[in-house]
Amino acid sequence: MGYETATLALPLPWQKEVWDRFNHAVEVDRLPHALLLHGSNGVGKRRLAITFAQRMLCAAKANQYACGTCKSCKLLLAGSHPDLSILEPAEEGKKILVDDVRKLCTKLNTTAQQGGWKIGLILDADAMNINASNALLKSLEEPQGKTLLILISDRLHALLPTIRSRCQKQYLPIPNVGIVTDWLTEVSGNSADVSKAIEVSNGCPLLALHNIESGTLGMRQDFESVIEGVANGSMSSVDAAQKCAKLNGNNLVEWYMNYLHRLATNEGQGGADLSLFHFQDRLVSARKLLLSQSNVNQQLLLEGLFMDWAQSSSSRNN
């Protein structure tokens, strides 16, 4: 889901209002020292952060976008701009550690090599552990001139209140489904899968695009067929677990939770059954187990989940 930093781009169509607000802040010299972009995974927070960082580093000050031709833009295109620092976990699911944050802060405290802005991006701020978060506070409390920190968060509540209070927060909502449909149809060239991709991605456009381009959409549809087979009794829990044995366990739990969310939302018109929320707790426990251990017996875990799902579905249908 990352966006290549060695590529110059425009903001996404549904980000125009936020983009105009950021540009106005630059024009009237009211840009904060720290921005916190938050919202659902897949709405384009990283894309917006990187695109705005590129705009700030561009030497063509009259432009509202990176020009692509100045020396700074050429450095950005080469992926080697010395005044752009990007911090994210070394691996998916790992934490950002205190030493990583200290290195970022030290670099931001030095003189800009290109004579302009210094930009620091923390692309997964939720992943900072407590020591890393505390190390960041000093930079937020004592900002340097012409230095901008941009934090990205999928889960705003996971950040320390002291960090949230020292940033200007910008929420990026899930865009209108019509805008997403038009954009996704154009960029994917696959109009047949657009509607289902938007559905399983809860309307998040970049997540929907990833599902189409990676082939994940087909796997998710197959998995949801298994879920429905267990629910209606046409597939046993053991057979369902065997059918899903080769798929990534963390992905399966995420897909399951997404399916459950859509089911609860649809049923919510008449009051969703409490058994759905109880089963969601079961999925949360399964995800914690998968994240905390590397030797989990996925077959047994899935069999247990599917047995509970069959019971939950039976109680809801009676």
Image: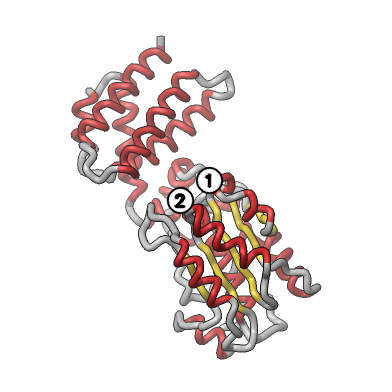
Compared to 275, does 239 lie above or below? below
Q: Amino acid at mark 2?
A: Ala
Q: Where does the C terminus fall, quadrant-wise? A: top left
Where does residue 42 sit, x and y in percent of width and height? 50, 53
Classify mark 1: helix, strand or loop.
loop
Is residue 183 visible in the rendered structure shown here? no
Q: Residue furthest bottom?
A: 71
Q: Where does the N terminus fall, quadrant-wise? A: bottom left
Residue 208 circle label: 2
Task: Give 118 or 247, whichever is nearer the viewer.
Answer: 118
Where does residue 51 sit, x and y in percent of width and height? 57, 70
Residue in the image at 69% along x and 58% along y: 168
Q: Residue furthest right?
A: 28
Compared to 30, does 111 lie above or below? below
Compared to 16, does 313 lie above or below? above
Q: Earlier in the sequence, mark 1 or mark 2?
A: 1
Residue in the image at 55% along x and 62% along y: 135
Residue 307 circle label: none
- For label 2, the crowd category at 10 Å Cα-Cα, with few meaning under 14, some 14 to 19 and many 20 or more, is many
Q: Residue furthest top?
A: 318
Residue in the image at 42% along x and 60% along y: 89
Q: Label 1, on which residue?
A: 203
Total numbered labels: 2
Task: Give 189 or 106, whichever is nearer the viewer.
Answer: 106
Quadrant of res 232: top left
Q: Is residue 123 left or right of residue 137?
A: left
Where does residue 234 sit, x and y in percent of width and height? 26, 21
Where does residue 260 sit, x and y in percent of width and height? 44, 31
